[in-house]
Every structure is written in structure tokens, then in C-alpha cells.
């Protein structure tokens, strides 16, 4: 188990999230350094996210999604339709935090099965460290583009760990008619090696972006 405590001394407010982790070669079975950064953003903007409908893509241990739920959002979690263990881990994280009502959907990036069409109207789509394998990048962007088009006015917010300066998504955003803008980590007190009482994100370089459709003016 890994415990995260998000607090705000100015408002004497805090939440605690417990994440079960399993040492497994599948990517989604433990918490990556990007997750607490995205979760911190959600916590910092908890008044904005309250009552919004949120989908977490590639949720894995689902730390950001669970923080959003504890902040009053209506949250849907998703992970690959072909990786049932990752979806099971989402469920375990929900149960560990008393969030038995959260739905976990089988959504595989780049594939448009019935589950993606059955999602409710979304306000916010989130993802942490889904941009890991270069081969998946366009499938992720294709999925995000579809969801943004299907949900006018929605926004995609994601974190990723810088592993190589040559691995970028800017050309894919251009191809899929999307606009991306960087959100400085200092804007929400995430520019530090330890967040929420954990040793994450450590010394990794983490970036956050917001993406919207270019059709939105």
C-alpha cells in the first residue's frame, strides 16, 4: 500500500488516498511519478473540478481519478480492454478508498468499441504517463480527439515524464486538429521532489499539458 495525503493549510482541508500496488511488469500495476503531479493539480483546483464529469484514461492505480472523486467530481475510470488485471487494480484502488460506485471501463487506445460510445457527457479527460511507448502515441491522441469532438467544451489534461527530447506529440496534435499548452508545475505547488507525503515524483522531469479542440474559440 502507498498512502498520499493532500492538504491545504490555508483552508485546513485535506484528503487521504490509499493505493494498493502490485509489482508486475504490466505498466498500470503501480503508481508512476506523473500520477501525484496530476493528482496535485486536481486537488489544487478542487473547487473547479467539483461536480464535473471526469474520465481517466489508462488509469492503472487511478490516483488522479480517486482524488477527483474525493473532491466531488463524477468520475469514470478506464484502462485497456485487453488488460483485465489493470482494470482489476482500478477496482481495488476504489474499494480501498470507499469509492464502490466508481465505474471502470475497458477502453483501448485507438479502438472504438461500444464502451467508448456508452460514456456519459464528459467535461474533463485526464491521463498520467500514458505517453510512455512511442507506438501508442497516435492511438492515444486519436482517442482523445474523438472524445473531445464528442464532448464539445471538454478539455484533456495530462502529465508525462520526459524520457527523451525526441519523443514529442506536437506533430500529432497538429494532425488531429488539437491545441496544446503547457501548465507550469509551479502554478499548483507541484514543482518539488515529494508530493502528498510520498517520495514521488522524485527527481524525474514531469510536464503537464492542457489540450483542447481547435474548433473551440
Image (cartoon, helix red, strand yellow):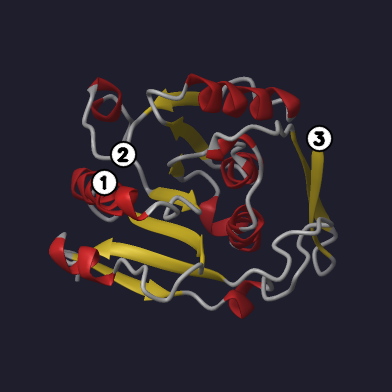
Instruction: Classify the position of the N terminus by image quarter.
Output: top right
Q: Which of marks 3 and 1 is nearer the N terminus?
A: 3
Q: Quadrant of residue 83?
A: top left
- Lateral position of residue 26 relative to residue 33, left or right: left
- Lateral position of residue 104 relative to residue 21, left or right: left
Q: Earlier in the sequence, mark 2 or mark 3?
A: 3
| Distance Cα–Cα, label 3 vs label 1 | 31 Å
> Element type at marker 3?
loop
In percent of width and height, residue 28 lies at 56, 37
| Distance Cα–Cα, label 2 vs label 1 | 5 Å
Label disc, if present, on residue 1 of the rendered structure: 3
Q: Name the residue under label 2.
A: 109
User: Tag 3: Cα neighbours inside 10 Å, few (<14), some, or many (≥20)?
Assistant: few
Q: Are marks 2 and 1 in contact (CB under 8 Å)?
A: yes
User: Tag 2: Cα neighbours inside 10 Å, few (<14), some, or many (≥20)?
Assistant: many
Q: Quadrant of residue 195?
A: bottom right
Q: Mark 1 points at which residue?
A: 139
- Lateral position of residue 144 relative to residue 183, left or right: left
Instruction: Classify the position of the C terminus by image quarter.
Output: bottom left
Q: Nearer the viewer, residue 48 or 124?
A: 124
Picture residue at 57% right of the left edge, 21% below the top: 88
In percent of width and height, residue 128 lies at 51, 52
> With respect to residue 41, does 75 lie above or below?
above
Picture residue at 48% right of the left edge, 33% below the top: 77
Amino acid at each position: 500500500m502507498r498512502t498520499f495525503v493532500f492538504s491545504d493549510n490555508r483552508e485546513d482541508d485535506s484528503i487521504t488516498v490509499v493505493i494498493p500496488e502490485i509489482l508486475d511488469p504490466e505498466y498500470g500495476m503501480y503508481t508512476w511519478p506523473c500520477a501525484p503531479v496530476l493528482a496535485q493539480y486536481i486537488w489544487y483546483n478542487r473547487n473547479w473540478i467539483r461536480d464535473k464529469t471526469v474520465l481517466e484514461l489508462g488509469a492503472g492505480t487511478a490516483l488522479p481519478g480517486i482524488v477527483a472523486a474525493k473532491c466531488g467530481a463524477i468520475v469514470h475510470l478506464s484502462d485497456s480492454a485487453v488488460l483485465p488485471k489493470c482494470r482489476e487494480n482500478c477496482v481495488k484502488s476504489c474499494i480501498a478508498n470507499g469509492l464502490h460506485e466508481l465505474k471502470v471501463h475497458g477502453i483501448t487506445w485507438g479502438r472504438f468499441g461500444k464502451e467508448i460510445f456508452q460514456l456519459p457527457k464528459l467535461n474533463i479527460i485526464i491521463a498520467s504517463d500514458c505517453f510512455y511507448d512511442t507506438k501508442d502515441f497516435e492511438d492515444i491522441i486519436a482517442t482523445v480527439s474523438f472524445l473531445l469532438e464528442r464532448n464539445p467544451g471538454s478539455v484533456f489534461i495530462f502529465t508525462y515524464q520526459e524520457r527523451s527530447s525526441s519523443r514529442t506529440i506536437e506533430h500529432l496534435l497538429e494532425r488531429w486538429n488539437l491545441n496544446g499548452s503547457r501548465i507550469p508545475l509551479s502554478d499548483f505547488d507541484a514543482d518539488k521532489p515529494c508530493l502528498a507525503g510520498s517520495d514521488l515524483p522524485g527527481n524525474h522531469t514531469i510536464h503537464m499539458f492542457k489540450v483542447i479542440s481547435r474548433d473551440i474559440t
